[in-house]
Image (cartoon, helix red, strand yellow):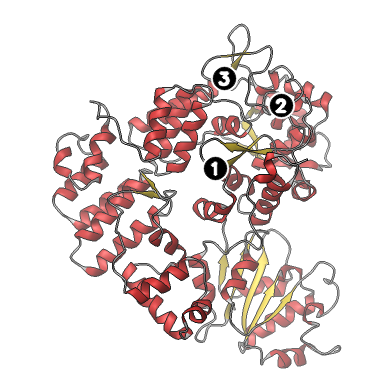
Amino acid sequence: MRTYRQDAKTLELPWPFTGRSEELERVRAALTGGRPGIVVTGPAGHGKTRLITEAVRGLDHARVTGTPEARDLPLAAFAHLLPDTVSLHRAVRALSGVRVLVVDDAQLLDETSAALVHQLAVHGRTRLIVAAADGVPAPGAVSRLWTGELLPRLPLGPLPPEDTARLLAGAALDPLTVRRLHQACRGDLRLLRDLLTALTEATRPTPLPSPALAGVGAPVSVPGAESAGAGVPVSASGTAMAPAELPVPPTGAGLVGAGWLEPVPGTGEWAWRGPLPVTPAVRERLAPALERPGPGERDILDRLAFAEPLPLPLNELDESDLEALERLEADGLINVGEQGEVTLAHPLHGTALRATAGRLRARRLGRTALAYGPALDAERSTLVRNLERLDVRPVPTPVGEWLVAHGIPLPARYAEVRARFARLRGEVREAAAWAREGLRPAPSDGGCRGELRLAEGGPAEPAGPDDVHARYAAVRLGEPGRAAGRLPAGSVLARHADALARADGPALDRAAEALAERGFTLYAAEAYAQAARTHRDPSAARRSRTRAVALARRCQGASTPALAGLVLGELTARQRQIVTLAAAGLSNREIAEKLTLSVRTVGNHLYSAYTRLGTGDRTTLPWLLDGSDRVTA
């Protein structure tokens, strides 16, 4: 029997190569001139292999891969390139004719293969592109490639949030789900694929009542608890209740061990609500937390899991548990704050531990959970205080995010502030999502309706006497005179207005930098765009334009008058044709075949276009050329 979840979109594999433009250029640069190559390191699943594959696309190269099974077999990884029996010296000579050698999973090479790679680096006749995972022992000959300065090292960090969003664009997920997936996977793209596959392809399981998920599996009221109108469940006495304190929901209200996707009305998007789908692949990745051998360790992890989204004070743990706590901290499974608060280190561990806990254990541990109402109020107060200070840099808000992730209605007054905070940061799609969350329990709430209208590009209400951002809108529209004397003296907004009124390009750059430092990403992009039009020096204009584009890419498709026409109209017809195909993901060779041009001609046109656009980043092209579906903010 089909369920609505099977109608959710899935991404075809392999996923498109996304982001990593700077890293890609560094690897490609290592293949040119007299350079010897490069070593790419990073945690498992961060995309090292995919990055290297993209870098050597179209080049003649050989590839070897280390495997656990062949780690004790000399030269096993090179078996397809060398005779059956060969000495190390002859192996070096045999491979000296290979121009480019890709070595994947180098940490798994046998000692002889590792020595061969090291010798190839010493001789320098073969360019080496080596991938090695962090956090696991590697043969000494492999680690000496970069510690001995034979090859430069490129550490590969997690994919940025905006690139994760672009990667998942084809799955039609709502922005809060994209954020949750990004935070949960911590850059592990294989884990991201496992979770997305489990959410989109699995049939929704049979609903079962579960105390482990009481109050977190259903966005509806729970019998025996009343709603405070703002969405926080309360007891009959009016005290806010923690998830584990809520009455056990009836059949149909909770799901055991699996989350689900549900449609977001009016958006065409899908939202992940509920716990983690603990598939075999996910369980394998969570083994360090789920299979702790030490005495008392699993019990501590379970207690922390059922205390989420709040930390557990250290003084609530037994002193006899200190040794277990020290082991867990040493292994990176828990974090201990400066005030003694203890939390799980990985965002996936809590939901996995709760989903795999037995029914009786869940009842016993659930009674110790803290009420989240006061913590939610504290988060809102922090956000309001920062808004008043014109500071929208990210602040931790685990309680609100946890409640949304588990389908618990949010207070409208909290959701309104979250939406406003996100909108002023330029995260317009997230702002709309937060506003919708507030409208779930309170469909007529004026504050959330107003934020949703603004996030979706609707007209703003007339500026009130205290609405500094409404008065600042004139500066964003390029009319600083209308805001003269109406912005807080000395504020970053006032400095922007003054620089624009004086048509001072360098001052606009400084104002944009200050806006970005305080978290106003969209405002900063607009200020840089205005600077690009103001500068008389073409090179300074290009720098400002490049910065404007880089910041605008992080604003979830927002389009404003200041950003309109930032780069369009500067290309010839042929350049625009080639850039459009490059923005669609085609390689230079594919573009050349499609337009019956040489690869060199395509490259020359792209180089000229990059110069005019003020960017060398191929991943910015979709944003630059496709403005039809962007939100007006």
Residue visible at 53% across and 51% down in the picture = 165
Q: Is there any visible trace of residue 392 in the rendered image?
A: no
Which tag, 2 or 3, sits closer to the chain's start? 3
Amino acid tagged 2: Leu
Which of 76 and 416 lies nearest the eye of the viewer? 416
Q: Is 427 left or right of 63, judged from the image as shown?
A: left
Task: Give the answer, above or below, for where 460 lies relative to 179.
Answer: above
Q: In the picture, which quadrant includes the N terminus?
A: top right
User: Residue placed farthest to the front in the image?
Assistant: 1
Which residue is disc 3 drawn over? 232
Q: CA distance from mark 2 to mark 1?
A: 46 Å
Residue visible at 47% across and 26% down in the picture = 414
Which tag, 3 or 1, sits closer to the chain's start? 3
Q: Secondary structure at mark 1?
A: loop
Which of 383 and 272 lies nearest the eye of the viewer? 272
Callout 2 touching callout 1 (CB < 8 Å):
no
Residue 487 in percent (x, y) is at 21, 35
Callout 3 touching callout 1 (CB < 8 Å):
no
Amino acid tagged 1: Gly
Question: Which image quadrant for residue 328?
Answer: top right
Observer-side mark, 2 or 3, equals 3
Please give the label number shown on residue 317. Answer: 2
Please give the label number shown on residue 268. Answer: 1
Residue visible at 28% across and 35% down in the picture = 469
Residue 201 in percent (x, y) is at 72, 48
Q: Secondary structure at mark 2?
A: loop
User: Residue placed farthest to the top in the image?
Assistant: 237
Residue 323 in percent (x, y) is at 76, 36
